Image: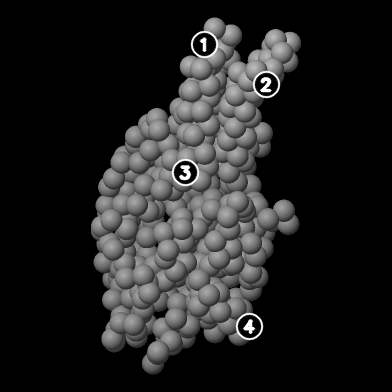
Amino acid sequence: MKRDSIVTAPDMIRAPESQSTGRLVDSPFAIAAQIVETIGPRPPGSIGEAKTAAFLDARLRQSGLRLSAESYHASHPPDYDGIVYGVLAIAGVIGFYWTPLVAILVFAACCGATVLTLWYDTTFLNRRILSQNVIATRAAEGVMRWRLVVLAPLCSPPAVGHWALALGSGLTGRIGRTVAATLLLALGIAAAAPFSFEVRLWLWYAQAAPAVALLVQGIAALVVQRAPATPGAISYAGALATLICAAAHLRDLQHTEVWMIGVGAASSAAGINDLLRRYPFEPQQTLFVGLDGIGSGELCYLAAEGALHPRLADSLLLRLAARVIDNGQATARPCAYRGITLAGVLRRRGLRTLGIASLDRYGRIPYRNERNDDISRLDAAHLDNSVRLIVGLARSIDTIA
């Protein structure tokens, strides 16, 4: 007799048996609790991240998937770029009185570097760490028409304050550095123009403000880099638990090949780069679903990601997600997210993606970068709902001719 699908019986989330061992698969809440309480914080490239990779490997093997682990070196942002910009800016301001042309060239170099960082996420001074991707696959039972790739981060983010995070990391920090460096260059050029001595002197004094701002942002970046990792319940144990439980229920897809991937050092693009280098997926046939912070708040499928130039999710995946919701298989809503998830990184490479995350009323991942992102923050029903959404989406894909 055919086993009931998760999408029609939510209570079955806790019931499927492992294909290889026959034992019951734990609930997503229990799996997330194991990651948070047994492994603990998982900084990128750490022993904790490696233990999480081994845990994911073991659980996916129990569900009958074929496993491989691919190691690579990743740069660990925010690196030392920011503090170098600040030191160079201060030195340029001091030396401007004697050698304005050299100082302007230094300001231009800082400005160009910050623009590259803002638009292309480029880093120049890297602290390299060893990380890995865990890749699990299950072939379609019939003729393959689609490939579904579900991704979740293996690490947990740093535990830092809001202001240090805003100044030293992420989109806000990159925008701030670019604005400060651009203003410094403009003041340098203006101070070298044929104005009166008094005007040029005041323009020279004014250079101190953006130079100090660059230095402060560089110090904030070091604070973020050296901060301990959070317990990572919502970010990203909930996502990993969702991935593991969804894999246990997706054994009978006729036309869809399933890939379940844990991405290491998710704060950098190295894991995605290594994945795409080793596995050049066919872009039209492959659909990517990126899981971000999941476990509390409101479950959302992300119609757009990014603040400066938002990228829209794949239209087919958006329609299928809406169909799953309309059919009552799961509860979620579409929304725009100002951050960038793993799906957003892949979307910028021209691939077909959809991000899924839990958001609070401010449009942010709840308790991200907070020390109290522990098991008490997870909602078991919310995790069950996220599994139903992934499984319903996969089964909807499988029905497309």
Where does label 1 land, which residue? 99
Question: Residue sitting at 40 percent across and 76 percent down?
Answer: 250
Q: Relative to the observer, which residue lies in front, 335 or 182?
A: 182
Residue under label 2: 209
Q: CA distance from mark 3 to mark 2?
A: 25 Å
- The first of marks 2 and 1 along the sequence is 1
Q: Where's the N terminus, which quadrant?
A: bottom left
Q: CA distance from mark 2 to mark 1?
A: 20 Å
Closer to viewer: mark 4 or mark 2:
2
Q: Is residue 92 above or below residue 221?
A: above
Residue 135, percent from left and from top: 31, 60
Quadrant containing the C terminus is bottom left
Tell me what residue is drawn at x 54 percent, y 61 percent. 311
In 3D space, how far apart are the residues under numbered discs 1 and 3 (Cα atoms)? 32 Å
As measured in the structure, the alpha-carbon distance from the residue carrying label 4 to the one carrying label 3 is 38 Å
- Element assignment for label 4: helix
Residue 248 image position (x, y, % from top left): 40, 71
